Amino acid sequence: QGQVTESGGGVVQTGGSLRLSCTASGVDFDDVAMGWFRQAPGKAREGVACINGKAHGGSYFYADSVQGRFIISTDNAKPTLYLQMNDLKPEDTAVYYCAARMGAPCTSVGPAYPHWGPGTQVTVSS
């Protein structure tokens, strides 16, 4: 339960787009906070986006650095979490992680998420 796996990373040029996907076994997408975090070399991990399940209002949040460029969404039928990343910049280069926090709402505090995927590398070339 709570096994998380990301996919969809890769290398893209500045201004390009990528879509990350995340599956989480045994997770009720209606009662969970699903977050995307990233960590660039030499930098601390940071929250990128988070979406609440219906039980927590279905709201979503973005870091200021990605607001207007990234879109977080879920397909509860699959169930899968997505992060559509548009207008990518070199500073978006990082390992991106998906994290699940069952029975609770979004928070930007990484340790509050018990379940993490292994991460997927996103590299944006200039």
Image: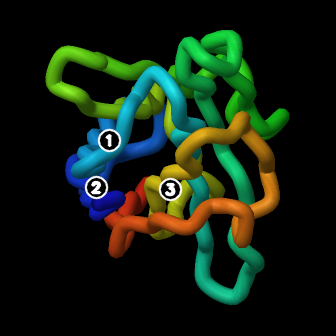
- In this view, the residue farthest toward the left is 78
Is 17 rendered above or below residue 43?
above
Q: Nearer the viewer, mark 2 or mark 3?
A: 3
Q: How busy is the neighbourhood of tag 3: few (under 14 within 10 Å), some, or many (20 plus)?
A: many
Say what secondary structure mark 3 lies in: strand
Name which residue lies at 72% across and 35% down: 105
Residue 106 in sight here: yes
Q: Tell me whether circle 2 and circle 1 mark residues in contact (CB < 8 Å).
A: yes
Instruction: From the viewer's side, name the closer residue of 36 and 112.
Output: 112
Total marks placed: 3
For the residues labelled 2 and 3, the Cα–Cα distance comes to 9 Å
Residue labelled with disc 3: 99
Say what secondary structure mark 1 lies in: strand
For badge 3, the amino acid type reads: Ala
Residue 109, quarter of the rendered image: bottom right
Where residue 45 appears, x then y in whole percent?
A: 70, 71
Where residue 5 appears, x then y in whole percent?
A: 26, 59
For badge 1, the amino acid type reads: Leu
In the rendered structure, find residue 20 and report the number of the disc placed on it.
Answer: 1
For the residues labelled 2 and 1, the Cα–Cα distance comes to 7 Å
Name which residue lies at 37% across and 45% down: 13
Name which residue lies at 45% across and 67% down: 116
Where residue 117 appears, x then y in whole percent?
A: 37, 66
The colour scheme of the drawn protein is rainbow
Instruction: From the viewer's side, name the closer residue of 118 and 112.
Output: 112
Is 49 rendered above or below residue 54?
below
Say what secondary structure mark 2 lies in: strand
Residue labelled with disc 2: 6
The earlier-in-sequence mark between 2 and 3 is 2
Residue 84, quarter of the rendered image: top left
Q: How busy is the neighbourhood of tag 2: few (under 14 within 10 Å), some, or many (20 plus)?
A: many
